Amino acid sequence: EGVAVSEDVGESDAGMVVKAEAQPLCEAMGRLLEDAALRERFSVSAKKLAKERFSLDTMGAALKKLYENIVSRGKGLNG
């Protein structure tokens, strides 16, 4: 909890989202150490999330859109 991608990770089943406290972290790590199928599921989901949300193409397109919005707003200020 409390990090920028925690919601994405939780919603995408790409990992566990726990409080940044010792006990919940230890429990989550223990579960991961014991469950190979869970690790594999998280791995597949995390790779998919990274590709869909954070690939170079995706981030480039989002940045381009942001710059286009900034430029279009700026045009109205100069005229």
Image (cartoon, helix red, strand yellow):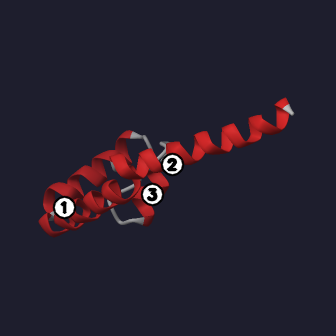
Residue 18 visible in the snapshot: no
Q: Position of residue 38 (x, y in %)?
A: 21, 66
Which badge, 2 or 1, comes first in the chain's sequence? 1
Q: Which residue is mark 1?
A: 39
Question: Residue 15 falls in which quadrant of the image?
Answer: bottom left
Secondary structure beneath disc 2?
Answer: helix
Q: Which residue is mark 3?
A: 8
Secondary structure beneath disc 1?
Answer: helix
Question: Residue 23 falls in which quadrant of the image?
Answer: top left
Q: CA distance from mark 1 to mark 3?
A: 17 Å
Residue type marked 2 = Ala
In percent of the image, x 75 and y 34: which residue is there? 74
Secondary structure beneath disc 3?
Answer: helix
Which badge, 1 or 3, comes first in the chain's sequence? 3
Q: What label does residue 62 carry, if any?
A: 2
In percent of the image, x 24 and y 50: which residue is there? 29
Residue type marked 3 = Asp
Direction top: furthest residue:
78
Mark nearest the camera among 1 and 3 is: 3
In percent of the image, x 41 and y 52: which residue is there? 58
Residue type marked 1 = Arg
